[in-house]
Amino acid sequence: MGFLQVILSSQKHIDKSRDYTFLHPWLGTGLLTATGGKWFSRRKMLTPAFHFKILEDFVDIFNTQSNVMVNKLKKKANGETFDIFPYITLCALDIIC
């Protein structure tokens, strides 16, 4: 095993970019934002649920609900700033439900 492989596969030496800290208020330290052992244990637990064969069954739902969100966002695309959080949250809930 080469040195690079040891470093890149290490839970101890790999960390997320500081950019991920901006997601902590919204997502906490879940799979996307966690690092080290916390990330590894959560990834290991969730990996089977997100196998590409399982997700293929949901592509139509992802597509439909994403289009609903895009149509809602088009109404807000007037150059003014707005909070996108409620739109993403509702889209995620619609996909999950």
Image: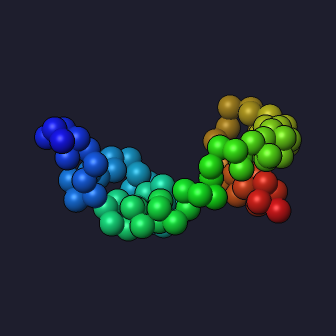
For the point 40% across and 62% down, which residue is it?
39
For the point 62% across and 49% down, which residue is it?
51
The answer to whether residue 13 shows anywhere in this view is yes
Total numbered labels placed on residues in the image: 0
Which quarter of the rendering shows the C terminus?
Answer: bottom right
Rendering colour mode: rainbow
Q: Where residue 30 sits in the image (x, y, percent)?
A: 49, 64
The answer to whether residue 18 shows anywhere in this view is no
Task: Give the left or right position of residue 35, taking residue 69 as reference.
Answer: left
Q: Nearer the viewer, residue 85 or 78?
A: 85
Relative to 81, is 45 above or below? below
Q: Nearer the viewer, residue 78 or 21?
A: 21
For the point 77% across and 60% down, which residue is it?
96
Q: Quadrant of residue 3?
A: top left
For the point 28% across and 58% down, which residue is it?
11
Task: Give the left or right position of residue 79, taking residue 60 as reference.
Answer: left
Q: Quadrant of residue 29?
A: bottom left
Q: Where residue 76 sits in the image (x, y, percent)?
A: 77, 39
Q: Where residue 86 sits in the image (x, y, percent)?
A: 71, 57
Q: Quadrant of residue 74?
A: top right
